[in-house]
Amino acid sequence: MGEVLSQEEIDALLSALSDGQVDAEEIKTTKVQKKVRVYDFKRPNKFSKDQIHSLQNIYENFCRSLTTYLSGHLHSVIEAKVSSIEQITYDEFIRSLPNPTIISLYTMSPLEGTLLMEMSPTMAFSIIDRLLGGQGQGTEKNRDLTEIERTIISHRVQQMINLIGEAWQEVFPAQPEFIVLETNPQFTQIVAPNEMIILVTLEVKVGEMAGMLNMCLPYLVLEPILDKLSTLFLFSTQAKVTSKEQVQAIRKKIEWAKIDLTAILGHSEILVRDLLELAPGDVIPLVQNIKEPLPIYVGSFKKFRGIPGLHGEHLAVQITEIVEEGRDQDG
């Protein structure tokens, strides 16, 4: 049913018709355009919205684990997020990849079939450069990996695949296993070209460099657990009860987090006048007895006490006491 005009709108329309501002014939011939959603019968959607939402949650968890892992190994700021999830044919996916690129084939027992993870050369060379002591600039021209580079990136890829398995634990007890590293997309025919896949694209920033990580999940591989993906979405919208296994998983991930550990040698109070007159060679007395242990802070909390010394050619602090939780906390 169309909208009912108010008296003011009717008067304004009649006035516009009489003044010639609106043509009556145009009003008669105006057609309402219907919204039509295009559906390609050659590429039927095999994944429901609930299942795609569950995949989004799984790979967002993977992004958090990946960020922690790469930050600890590359000593750099890492950002990872799910950029898109789409259903396409395997042929479309393979044709979109550069040659050469970094392709990892793996399985996830007890599922049958092979899955694929593609890492953009930009991201791969940035990681390699960081691990070899560089600034993570990568390479200007796309090229094949050397044997040393191939070994380095293979080790990192295997760990990433293990993290994928951890992210899937809420759905089923996945046991990922790395198969092989390839660089030519034409040599990775894991399913028929016209088979549908889910393509999960992740955007990963390593320092200033940004690259893509593509997860190719064939429908034939995920078909046995599609009902579990729908169930996962159902439970994800309800209140969650934290289990011991979840606590252990969170604790395991936290163990990779980097924190500041600070030993305070001492402090002193001086006049601003004296501060302005400080010069090289001046001695500042500290309110700290040399026989007393130094306070050691984890973040803003005093957690340990220790004595200063040397470890080889480096300054060090030996922990002599653990401060009880709740005591000596500085705000």
Image (cartoon, rainbow, N blue to C red):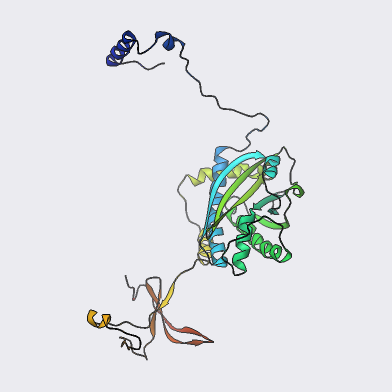
Write the residue at 58% across / 37% down. 48
Whether residue 269 is visible, yes or no, is: no
Quadrant of the rendered image containing residue 62: bottom right
Q: Tell which of 25 and 183 is nearer to you.
A: 25
153 vs 190: above or below = below
Q: Tell which of 193 and 132 is nearer to you.
A: 132
Quadrant housing the C terminus? bottom left
Location of residue 249 in the rendering, given as x and y in whole percent from the top left corner = 54, 61
- Residue reaching furthest bottom? 291
Write the residue at 40% across / 70% down. 299
Location of residue 217 in the rendering, given as x and y in whole percent from the top left corner = 65, 46
- Residue reaching furthest right? 187
Write the residue at 30% across / 16% down. 9
Location of residue 12 in the rendering, given as x and y in whole percent from the top left corner = 29, 14
Location of residue 167 in the rendering, given as x and y in whole percent from the top left corner = 58, 54
Quadrant housing the N terminus? top left
138 vs 330: above or below = above
Quadrant of the rendered image containing residue 199: top right
Quadrant of the rendered image containing residue 130: bottom right
252 vs 117: above or below = below
Q: Is residue 296 left or right of residue 135?
A: left
Q: Tell which of 245 and 286 is nearer to you.
A: 286
